[in-house]
Amino acid sequence: MRTRAYYNEHDPAACEWLRELMDRGLIPEGDIDGRSIADVEPDDLDGYAQCHFFAGIGGWAYALRLAGVPDLECWTGSCPCQPFSAAGKKRGTDDERHLWPEFLRLVAERRPQLVVGEQVEAAVAHGWLDLVSSDLEAEGYACGAVVMGAHSVGAPHLRQRLYWGGVLWEAVGEGLQPSSVAGGEAGREGAADGGLGHRDDVRQLQGEGRHEPQPGAGGLASGKPSEARFWDGAVWLPCRDGKARPTEPGTLPLADGLPRGVELLRGYGNAVVPQVAAAFVKALIG
């Protein structure tokens, strides 16, 4: 029986963070692989129901717990955002940190039932979403994506991100039912003829007013007051642009020279918002 999770993360500080989260019971027990994903072979993943690549501080593992599916067979992979981020050099797929091909290599060999991930919204303009969707559909996955922010689950800030996922058609009937977010029958037809069956829905969600919660977007943006309780104790951090932004209590001070301050800032900055990721997973699998 496959019960342990696999975490692949090359940052030693993040690996230490993952171990501490396991010790506290906040994420599933598992094995941490500190190598680059490029050095991971398919056989290394034998025996794992969940594999978390670019694991960071375990946001996706925690999200699956929040979604009520902690034992779901699922791979997660929020590929590095630097090639597409507005704060980077915007080299796109020419950047050496464009690691989607390495993730796809493992997915194609092992064929997990469900694959999900997160990326910066700007990656869409670089054709990254089309590439990911085309590659997954060629491997027999029904794909879907949506752009959501933390505000979609009641948080007091945007943190707009692209969430994407694929359900293996072979897994339909084994408990997984791809919802309309994953393209439904349209997604299956798109995979059959090499097209992108989900793309019209994605473009609509990225249209005018996309920075507002999208009612009816697969149930992902209800913004119920109860979902905002996580942020009740937020500490507001003054920034250079004159605005203040909320952070989790206990993360201050964040400054060079102070123990773990930079590690905390990097860890939270690269992490997914688990509440948003959980909502996406629930919508994706219906």
Image (tube, grey):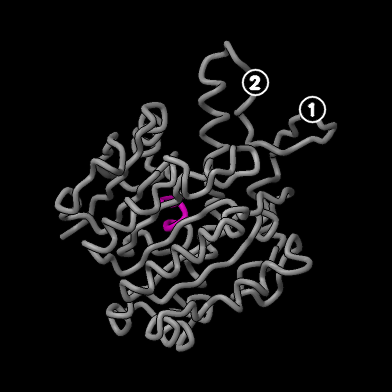
**Residue 259 appears in view:** yes
Residue 90's disc is: none
Note whether 209 is above or below 245 in the view shown: below
**Vertical position of residue 189 compared to residue 106: above or below:** below
For label 2, count other residues whose C-alpha is less than 10 Å away and answer few (under 14), some (14-19) or many (20+): some
Residue at horizontal 60%, vertical 38%? 88
**Residue 276 location, x and y as percent?**
57, 58
User: Residue at (24%, 41%) from the top-left corner?
Assistant: 39
**Distance in Å between CA atoms under marks 2 and 1:** 16 Å
Q: Is residue 210 left or right of residue 195?
A: right
Magenta span: chief secondary structure: helix
Identity of the amino acid at label 1? Answer: Arg
Determine whether, in the image, residue 183 is placed left or right of residue 15. Answer: right
Please tell me whether mark 1 sits on a helix, a strand or a loop: loop
Q: Position of residue 63 (x, y in %)?
A: 47, 55
Residue at the outermost front position = 94
The mark that comes first in sequence, 2 or 1, is 1
Q: Which residues are magenta?
A: 60-65
Residue hosting label 2: 253
Q: Is 230 included in the stretch rendered in magenta?
A: no
Residue 272 vs 173, above or below: the answer is above
Q: Which residue is mark 1?
A: 240
The reply to whether residue 276 is in sight is no
| Residue 191 coordinates in the image, percent (x, y) | 40, 80
